[in-house]
Amino acid sequence: MTEKRLEFGREGEAAAVRHLKKQGYRILETNYRSSAGEIDIIGEHNRSLVFIEVKTRAGLEKGHPAEALTAHKQRKIGQVAKQFLTQYRVADRPCRFDVVAITGDPENPKGWKIEVIQDAFRL
């Protein structure tokens, strides 16, 4: 992956955090890592613990950003979420998986379209 694409992804995650906070999410962690992988953002919203994947794309030529979240990636996120729930002893909390899809010119963040897809998938 090129440095430019990595930077676009990092900036997208920062934009997602700002957007989620405006939507009433309380951000608990970013880039949570475990032996199973990583979750971009973990937060709370409407009494639920929310595991959030951020997907950024410059355009829709290759499809909507959320389409990049394959079944394999969903399972990996589920494994990481289980480890988080165990580590922090919060397995009894209601949980959901959201996706933040960001599209737009990497050079023009003010023009990005940010879409939050709540309860985007279930395991």
Image: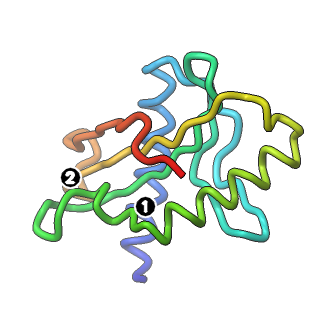
Question: Is 105 placed left or right of 74 in the picture?
Answer: left
Q: Judge by depth and name the residue closer to the eye, 22 or 116.
A: 116
Is residue 115 positioned above or below 79 on the image?
A: above
Residue 110's spot in the image, x, y percent?
25, 39
Disc 2 residue type? Gly
Residue located at (26% from left, 61% from top): 57
Of mark 2 and mark 1, the one earlier in the sequence is 1
- Which residue is disc 1 drawn over? 9
Residue 33's spot in the image, x, y percent?
73, 61
User: Which quadrant: the N terminus?
Assistant: bottom left
Disc 1 residue type? Gly
Q: Could you say whether the residue bearing mark 1 is in a helix, strand or loop?
A: helix
- Which residue is disc 2 drawn over? 104
Q: Could you say whether the residue bearing mark 2 is in a helix, strand or loop?
A: loop
Is residue 16 positioned above or below 37 on the image?
A: above
Residue 119's spot in the image, x, y percent?
44, 37
Count of labels shown? 2
Q: Tell me the quarter of the picture where residue 34 sits.
A: bottom right
Residue located at (35% from left, 36% from top): 116
Q: CA distance from mark 2 to mark 1?
A: 12 Å
Question: Is 21 placed left or right of 101 in the picture?
Answer: right
